[in-house]
Structures are given as structure tokens and as C-alpha cells.
Amino acid sequence: MKRLGRKLGNGLGIGAEVVAAGMLAAIFLTFLYQITARYILGWSVGWTIELNLTLWLWLVLFSCAFVLRERDHVKFDLFFHAASPGRKKVFAILAAVAIVIAFAASLPASWDYVTFYKIKKSATLRWPLNYVYSIYIAFLVVMIARYGWRIVQILRGYDLSKDDRDILQD
């Protein structure tokens, strides 16, 4: 059963990477189209800027929620690495609890804000803004779940050294 769960998780991870790569490719192709249309053909194509901004927002939040692993995130860990293993555990739990509390506290207001935007549309593409910003709600929910699970893992004895990143090995 564990093997099936691991295969499913790996498949979902690869799928998320493909989605993120697709968004990045769409940003690049839209940018090339924008340059060609504006500087070679002399066309004004304002929709490309809005599409790229929306794709960038989705790419960053989607990737942070679904693609990046714990060890891929930027951290300020000077004190963490200088601490003993027991203190590292305390630091990791405190950090995870702070993230869960902060994101959970912001969720109701964020939900209200995003759902309020159903009355507005984007300037050029006329997309409902609640769709544009809905990725933020997904980001919050996933990060609350991830860091909630991280607290459980640490309390069960998770080896925090697995989170250390050696860029020479990647």
C-alpha cells in the first residue's frame, strides 16, 4: 500500500512539474509573440502583458504549493544550523506552527477578498478576477496542510537533516 501511495505521489509531483513547465513555456511564447507583434509587425497587443502577469502569479503560487519540496524553499537558517538536534526540532516546529497560524488566520479574509472580486473583470482579457486570484486560496490551503503535516512528522521523529540541501548533489 505504501508503494502505491508513493507511486501516486510521484505521479502527481511529475504532473505538477509539467503544469508549471507549461505555464513557463506559455509565458515565454507569449513574450516572444509580444516582441514580434510590437517591434516587427507594429501591432499593439496589450493582452500579452495581462496574460504574462496572470501566468506569472499562477506559476509562482502553484509551484510553491505543488512543486517545491521543503528543502527547495529559501530559508534564513543561520541559527538553525548552529543549533543542537533537539533545538533544531523546536525551531522547525515553531516555524511550522507560525506558518500554519498566519496562513490560517489570513484564510477567511483572503477568501472574502477573492470571492468579492467576482464582480470585477481583468482590464484586457475580461477574465473574472476571482478566477485570476483563486490560486492564492489553493496556495494557502496547501501550505496550511503541508506545514500541519510537517509538525506531525517532526513530532514523530522525522530526520530534519533530510531537508538540508546540497546543491552539488542535485
Image (tube, helix red, strand yellow):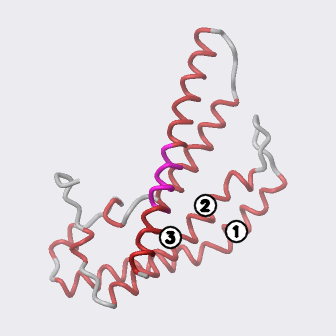
* 1 or 2: tag closer to the N-terminus: 1
Boundaries of the magenta span: 12-21
Mark toward the viewer: 1 or 3:
3
Residue closest to the eye, 3 or 116: 3
Residue 93 drawn at (x, y percent):
35, 83
Occupied quadrant, residue 75: bottom left
Occupied quadrant, residue 47: top right
Q: What kind of residue is marked 1?
A: Trp
Q: Residues within 10 Å of mark 2 (few under 14, many from 20)?
A: many
* 1 or 3: tag closer to the N-terminus: 1
Counting labels gives 3
Q: What kind of residue is marked 2?
A: Tyr
State the separation of the CA atoms marked 1 and 2.
Answer: 9 Å
Residue drawn where x is 50% and y is 55% of the image? 15
* 2 or 3: tag closer to the N-terminus: 2
State the separation of the CA atoms marked 2 and 3.
Answer: 10 Å
Residue drawn where x is 46% and y is 81% of the image? 148
Residue 89 drawn at (x, y percent):
27, 84
> Is label 2 in a helix, a strand or a loop?
helix
Which residue corresponds to mark 3? 143
> Is label 3 in a helix, a strand or a loop?
helix
Which residue corresponds to mark 1? 111
Residue 73 drawn at (x, y percent):
36, 60
Occupied quadrant, residue 51: top right
Image marks 2 and 3: residues in contact by CB distance under 8 Å:
no
Residue closest to the eye, 94 or 42: 42
Which residue corresponds to mark 2? 136
Residue 24 drawn at (x, y percent):
50, 40
Compared to residue 41, the image places residue 107 above or below, namely below
From the viewer's perspective, tell me whether residue 113 is left or right of residue 55: right
